[in-house]
């Protein structure tokens, strides 16, 4: 499920409702029908929001019992859509350019073999993604994983926010044709170059590869988002 297709206002409203402890005493959410009526939306729209909240770990589903508020809910004080509502494509790209090259540099020094293996698997899957939604999920996971490879919880959490913001502010504004990325989509080789540098423990190379990737992304977006020019 692509978060770019979710109403930010609805997502924020449901999140606020959750944090105000409006769920039942057993932390179980009301049935979808009642929640859809409460927020005056269709059940399909509500399911998109619940799927996003589940992916973030704010709620969880128990087959046969219902959907529950996760115990860790209160630890998430800053959410991407909150920041996205206050920013713009220029600032989002500026933040990425400052942050992600340094993250890649550190990741090259600390990434585990399992993390490198997962990066490789993500690169392979991105090349065969059958839709932009699938590609977007894989792409976001790749960038989050690079941050996780630093082992620095502060950088990981900052990257989580920046990654979410760019998917709302940048990715969600693009007109993506055809159904999925073409075989020669620029990001494929750019991700692989980042991976190669990290796998080779080439810190400066990883930083350079990430900078080149962000430059390629900016160039790709300029025609569709004039403010990036």
Image (spheres, rainbow, N blue to C red):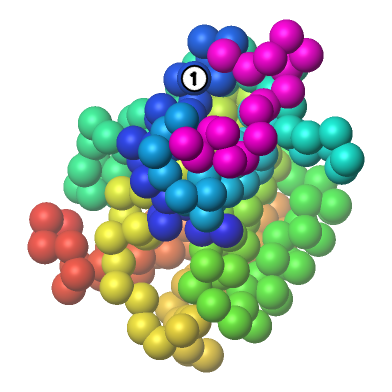
Looking at the picture, how far across and down is residue 40, in whole percent?
Answer: 39, 38
User: What residue appears at the point 27 percent right and 35 percent down from the top-left corner?
Assistant: 85
**Residue lying farthest to the right in this orientation:** 64
Res. 24 image quadrant: top right
Position of residue 161 relative to residue 70, above or below, is below
Judge whether residue 35 is colored magenta.
Answer: yes
Q: Nearer the viewer, residue 71 or 32?
A: 32
User: What residue appears at the point 85 percent right and 34 percent down from the top-left corner?
Assistant: 65
Q: Nearer the viewer, residue 68 or 198?
A: 68
Looking at the picture, how far across and down is residue 214, in whole percent?
Answer: 38, 59
Q: Nearer the viewer, residue 32 or 225?
A: 32
- Residue at the spot of label 1: 17
Quadrant including the N terminus: bottom right
Position of residue 184 relative to residue 67, above or below, is below
User: What residue appears at the point 54 percent right and 77 percent down from the top-left corner?
Assistant: 131
Res. 10 image quadrant: top left
Task: Report the span colored magenta.
Answer: 22-37
User: What residue appears at the point 36 percent right and 83 percent down from the top-left corner?
Assistant: 177
Visible residue check, residue 159: no
Res. 221 image quadrant: bottom left
């Amino acid at each position: 499920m692509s978060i770019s297709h979710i109403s930010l206002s609805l997502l924020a409203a449901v999140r606020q409702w959750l944090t105000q402890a409006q769920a039942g005493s057993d932390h179980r959410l009301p049935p979808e029908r009642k929640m859809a009526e409460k927020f005056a939306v269709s059940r399909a729209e509500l399911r998109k929001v619940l799927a996003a909240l589940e992916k973030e770990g704010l709620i969880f589903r128990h087959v046969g019992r219902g959907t529950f508020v996760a115990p860790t809910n209160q630890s998430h004080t800053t959410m991407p859509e909150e920041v996205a509502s206050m920013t713009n494509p220029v600032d989002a790209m500026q933040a990425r350019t400052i942050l992600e090259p340094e993250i890649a540099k550190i990741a090259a020094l600390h990434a585990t073999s399992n993390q490198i293996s997962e990066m490789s698997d993500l690169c392979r899957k991105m090349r065969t993604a059958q839709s932009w939604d699938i590609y977007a999920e894989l792409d976001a996971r790749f960038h989050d994983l690079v941050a996780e490879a630093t082992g620095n919880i502060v950088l990981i959490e900052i990257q989580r926010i920046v990654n979410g913001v760019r998917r709302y502010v940048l990715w969600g504004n693009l007109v993506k044709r055809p159904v999925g990325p073409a075989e020669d989509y620029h990001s494929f080789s750019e991700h692989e170059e980042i991976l190669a540098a990290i796998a080779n423990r080439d810190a400066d190379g990883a930083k350079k590869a990430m900078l080149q990737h962000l430059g390629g992304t900016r160039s790709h977006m300029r025609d569709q988002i004039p403010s990036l020019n």
